[in-house]
Image (tube, rainbow, N blue to C red):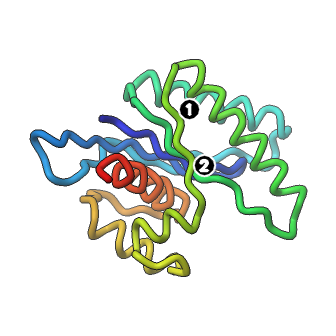
Amino acid sequence: MRILGIDPGFERVGIAVIEKNNETQNKEQLVYSECFKTLPSLHFNERLGLIGEEIKNIINKHNPDILAIETLLFNSNQKTAMKVAEARGVIVYEAITKKLEICEYTPLQIKIAIAGYGRADKKQVTNMVKQLIKIEKNIKYDDEIDAIAVSLTCSASYRA
């Protein structure tokens, strides 16, 4: 089973693809991860288009079975939340056009699945992700770690 995990955003989108084969391996393998960035100087609609194209390319290249995506937490900045919601919509649309199953997880569910504690901070989540899956590169942005975490959450929920 291949899972495409997404930490949605419009400036930075965390993307991860993990693979789990219950018959031949005990742990998930990280196939691909990145933090896809769009430039603030671009019009917002252009940014959405770039995000859609990147997700479409990732799906075509890695052939995931499932899209695992973090749900939105509404914060005090409604303008930002609306833009992230639009980016999330573009991502979900690309998954639907490729007939992927879609699994959504709240930040609380992800923290519980990864760190065992719903109020885990970024550092705790990062440390646990690095213990749960082999990462062979230096990851600069939390968005990428978060995408790996949502992928692992989906994998764990399928085992359960």
Q: Please name the residue shown 57% across and 47% down the image.
A: 104
Above or below, 50 against 76 in this view is above
Front in this rendered view, residue 53 or 5: 5
Question: Dot 2, how many residues are within 10 Å of its Cα: few (below 14), some (14-19), or many (20+)?
Answer: many
- Residue 91 percent coordinates (x, y): 63, 35
- Which of the two labelled residues, at mark 1 and mark 2, occupies the earlier sequence position? 2
Residue designated by label 2: 13
Front in this rendered view, residue 67 or 160: 160
Residue type at numbered disc 1: Ile
- Residue 59 percent coordinates (x, y): 47, 27
| Kind of element beneath mark 1 | helix
Q: Is residue 48 left or right of residue 76?
A: left
Q: Is residue 25 left or right of residue 144?
A: left
Above or below, 56 against 34 in this view is above
| Kind of element beneath mark 2 | strand
Residue type at numbered disc 2: Val
**Residue contact between numbered discs 1 and 2, judged by CB atoms under 8 Å:** yes
Say how many tags the image has: 2
Residue designated by label 1: 55
- Residue 81 percent coordinates (x, y): 81, 56
Above or below, 128 against 35 in this view is below
Q: Please name the residue shown 72% across and 47% down the image.
A: 10
Q: Quarter of the image containing the N terminus?
A: top left
The answer to which quarter of the image holds residue 130 is bottom left
Instruction: Name, please, the residue furthest toward the left.
Output: 24
Q: Please name the residue shown 42% across and 62% down the image.
A: 139
Q: Please name the residue shown 42% across and 56% down the image.
A: 153
Question: Dot 1, how many residues are within 10 Å of its Cα: few (below 14), some (14-19), or many (20+)?
Answer: many
C-alpha span from label 1 to label 2:
10 Å
- Residue 116 percent coordinates (x, y): 40, 75
